[in-house]
Amino acid sequence: MKSLLPLLLGLVILVLVAFSANERATVFNFQTPKDAYESTYKVYALSLPDSMSFAGENVPLQKPDVRERMDRELLVNTYWQSNMMLMLKRANKYFPTITAILNEERVPEDFKYLAVIESGLQQVRSYKGASGFWQIMRTTGREMGLEVNANVDERYHVEKATRIACKYLKRAYKKFGSWTLAAASYNRGVAGISRNLRSQKVDNYYDLYLGEETRRYIFRILAVKEIMKYPKKYGFVFAPKDLYEATEIKTVGLDTAITNIARFAQQMGVKYKELKLENPWLRQNHLNNKSRKYYEIKIPTTAGD
């Protein structure tokens, strides 16, 4: 019996070694780049919703070219995951303010998605000089009542710029009788859309033959609207704690100049950076205010150390 024990132990060891080798081979086979890629990476086609609308106006998805254009923007915005996730996070911070103003101005709430595709809800400046959430041009801003100069640029003032955008869109709606065409004119201009409608002898956006940017414009808005309304359907998973929150603020009104905004911030108990983040329309480290205009400056009350 004792003579058999080493033999049995040897057989057990051989079996274990063989099993281990087989397991290593299996793991290795699935961890090669080619096999891992082919076995795990999948890109899925998306199913378009049965119906879609913008500002209460139906999208004619029964038209083949409309379906193709809609599919393109839905795919692009779904699979550019990092960008869409950031927009979902920012929307939680800024949509309440924008939506409240749209409602006050009686502009359909869907126009908040126009701001998303224009700027990604960031205070950016385009190569053409359009600035802020609503990408307003310098001349347009001044013509519509915003202060725009080197010292103060209210295109970066979220509330004031949103009201100017509403003013433009309501004028465009009065001209066209269509919120979809009003939105398209935000990209192409009222005169440009009017010329296109007249020359092509049609009366709606979806029948127009347009340049690449304006041709995609409404569909980009629609895609962002669809994904932001139903994020889980398109694979975006997050908890409320993951979303960005608006900073709690108090408002200080003044009609005098500020010689040094950094010093002013210090007097208000906040850092210069914190004050600038809430008031990006203050473009320099001072406020001239020779005309004694009344300004309201946001002071964060929950600023970090």
Image: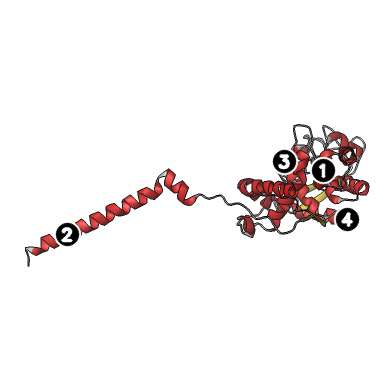
Q: CA distance from mark 2 to mark 3?
A: 76 Å
* Helix, strand or loop under label 4: loop
Residue 77 falls left or right of residue 289: left
Secondary structure of residue under mark 1? loop
Q: Give the residue number, with chain letter if any, for mark 3.
A: 272
Foreground mark, 4 or 2, reads 2
Q: Separation of disc 1 and disc 2 at Cα?
A: 79 Å
Q: Amino acid at mark 3?
A: Tyr
Q: Which residue is mark 4?
A: 106
Residue at which label 2 appears: 11
| Residue kind at label 2, given as amino acid type | Leu
The single residue placed furthest to the bottom in the displayed view is 1
Q: Closest to the observer: 302 or 189?
A: 189
User: Marks 4 and 2, how far apart in space?
Assistant: 83 Å
Q: Secondary structure at mark 3?
A: helix
In 3D space, how far apart are the residues under numbered discs 3 and 1 (Cα atoms)? 49 Å
Q: What residue is disc 1 on?
A: 208
**Foreground tag (1 vs 4):** 1
